[in-house]
Image: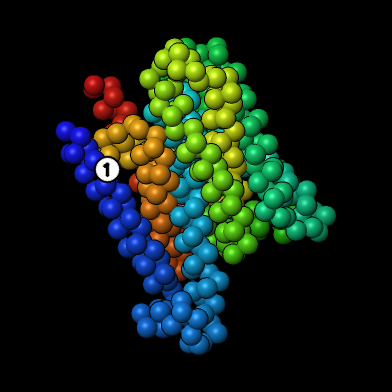
Amino acid sequence: MKNTRTLRIWGGFWLLLLLLFVFILWNIFAGSVSLSASDIWRILLGGDVGFTQSQIIVKIRLPRLLSALILGGALSLSGYLLQTFFHNPIAGPFVLGISSGAKMTVCVAMLALLSRGKTTSSAILIAAAFVGAMVSMGFVLLISQRVKRMSLLVVCGVMIGYICSALTDFLVTFADDSSIVNLHNWSLGSFSGMSWDNVKTMAVVCGITLLLAFLLSKPIRAYQLGEVYAQNMGVPLRAFRTALILLSSVLSACVTAFAGPISFVGIAVPHLMKSLFKSAEPLCMIPACFLGGGVFCLFCDLIARTAFAPTEVSISSVTAVFGAPIVIYMMIHRKAA
């Protein structure tokens, strides 16, 4: 039994790594400008193929695929941490309104800076998104103390998301035309326009948060078995809950700051990983959710930019098409069980 479980876990990780390799190659090759395998290989090795071809690979496709990988993993892990906190499989940063809160404060920061002719830095965007995420999370926590049924909590989270989105739309309506152009693609959700500086910043923020989540693996496992059990095992519940909230909010804020709101990844991917690995062990699920989220977003971003080329679809629309049926199936399956 133990050998079967070990084989399943190793098999699951090898499958994710294989899919990751396939989608990375696919994202490098796919695009409106077709490049041969030999040209791409020479560009990756630093060879001279042509200025335009090199710029397409090095400045556009590589930063974009790395952003999709990192931010997709961050969003999935954020969803897993929120599901652990609320003991609810349909909790996620998008559903609970956390992404919408982050989107609202980033919009305020961008409009304030752009109206004064100043550029927005990655640090300012992440800080603004974190403030919005924490404000939304505060409202969700207040509601969770009054609401007994988790389904009602999700409904309240959706309402918070609608309120934040309405306020964001109100701000955009009265913004300058130049500011609206900058906000439009971002507000719909997109990995386009990523730079290497953006990739470095998100890699540092998400890498540190991933490491901290790993360090919480044992307390998370104890908490999954019940609050009383966790308390008996010496887990300081208040500090532990605070850590979960902060980590999930940082991850959600980082995603929203760079790519805008992206739907259903935080709910669908953790469920897929649990079904694939048949395990709830945090030591297995944390890296699995991060890898799975990266693979899922690489696939969805590939569809978003190539399905109707040269027109690009928002990444959130594609993740909803593939993620929403998974969530519906999960809810029906839980009802049947």
Is 3 rendered above or below residue 194? above
| Quarter assignment of residue 209 | top right
Q: Quadrant of the C terminus?
A: top left
| Quarter assignment of residue 166 | top right
Q: Is residue 173 left or right of residue 252?
A: right
Q: Is any part of residue 188 visible from this angle?
A: no
Is 128 rendered above or below residue 95? below
Q: Is residue 325 left or right of residue 92?
A: left
Q: Residue at x 18, y 39 (%)?
A: 3
Identify the residue under disc 1: 9
Q: Is residue 232 left or right of residue 119?
A: left
Q: Nearer the viewer, residue 158 or 129?
A: 129
Q: Amino acid at mark 1?
A: Ile
Q: Residue 278 in the image: x percent, y percent? A: 26, 35
Q: Residue at x 55, y 19 (%)?
A: 236
Q: Residue at x 55, y 71 (%)?
A: 59
Looking at the image, which residue sits at the far right?
116
Q: Quadrant of the N terminus?
A: top left
Q: Is residue 18 left or right of residue 264?
A: left
